[in-house]
Image (cartoon, grey):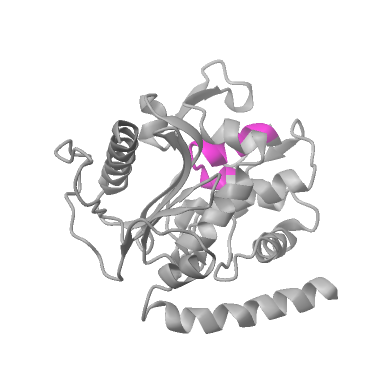
Amino acid sequence: MKRNLIMLFAAFSFVIPSLNAAAADKSTQQAASSGKRVTHTIQPGKTTVARSASSDYDGSGVLQLGSSKALIINQETGETLYAKNTNTPTPIASVTKLMTAMVVLDAGLPMDEIITVSKEDIDTLKGTTSRLRVGTSLPRGEMLRLALMSSENRAASALSRHYPGGQKAFLQDMNYKAYELGMLNTRFVDPTGLNSGNVSTAEDLVKLVRVAYEYEQIRLESTATSQEVAINGSRNPMQFINSNALVRKGDWVIGLSKTGYISEAGRCLVMQAEIGGQPLIIVLLDSDGKMTRIGDANRIRKWIENSYMTARMG
């Protein structure tokens, strides 16, 4: 009963901020009131930036990002380094799977228990395909890795169904967890992110990444570069790779990663990464081009590293 009342209050509280979010970005005022310095704030509106991971930006000029919503936070101090449309609710696609993973791990379910992909896990909303065919059986731990590393939708769906109370209870716990974390502009209606009803803000996703980073298994699985998986005992295992090219490239220090894409959300990327000696939480949402989020991440890295070197030379 108590949980139901809390969820009802959370649903109501989501409506009020959403009405005002599109009008103006409140992040500067919020940061100022908390005593945190905002180094770079962009007013609402999309900045046009080259859509590729171009190398023409050396980090010395004004940082311009192609993602329409972005937030960079120093993980240790909470300092806001860059903010752009941070309080605007938007679909978050497969970034959802970080919450899916936390709910699975919070339940303390055995990672070696075999769970099976069924017809219920087929994507009838977007019509996406999967290499996990109906009938595929894998340990829960393997399904969790595939959901986080390769963003496998059927793996995430199967995890939610093999949960005490089924998928309905799983979704309730996803939203309850969001409310507990103070993610009041966040709602989940499915465990995969395929449904555009899964919405959040850059500010809320910083909270999500900060807490998800505390889970060792999420850190490990989301930053694994690849994994060979023997499907139903097959002699020819399938190789799955990380959906984040920056993780695969290997020259970044990334402690947590999750990508996302559906047409309504654009290209999304959230990371915990160390740049210029700083542990950062980076949230990039609603990028137009296929490579825009990667280009943005590389521009951020150059910007931070240039600032770090300038400060050292002082």
For the point 63% across and 21% down, the residue is: 233
Q: Nearest the camera: 195 or 212?
A: 212
Relative placement, left or right, of 148 versus 300 is right
For the point 14% across and 38% down, the residue is: 56
User: Where is residue 134, by image quadrant?
Assistant: top right
Q: Is 158 drawn above or below residue 135 in the view shown?
A: below
Kindly give the residue lying farthest to the top in the view shown. 235
User: Could one spot residue 266 in this view of the protein?
Assistant: yes
Q: Nearest the camera: 62 or 85?
A: 62
Q: Nearest the camera: 63 or 202?
A: 63
Q: Principal SS element in the magenta part?
A: helix
User: Could one spot residue 88 in this view of the protein?
Assistant: no
For the point 75% across and 57% down, the residue is: 166
Q: Position of residue 177 (x, y in %)?
A: 69, 60
How many numbered callouts?
0
Kindly give the residue lying farthest to the left in the view shown. 56
Q: Position of residue 62 (x, y in %)?
A: 21, 52
Quadrant occupied by the C terminus: top left
Quadrant occupied by the N terminus: bottom right
Relative placement, left or right, of 143 versus 285 is right
Q: Nearest the camera: 65 or 244?
A: 65
For the point 80% across and 71% down, the residue is: 3
The residue range painted magenta reads 141-155
Q: Is residue 151 magenta?
A: yes
Q: Is residue 8 magenta?
A: no
Q: Position of residue 173 (x, y in %)?
A: 72, 61
Q: Is 9 drawn above or below residue 111 in the view shown?
A: below
Q: Position of residue 82 (x, y in %)?
A: 37, 55
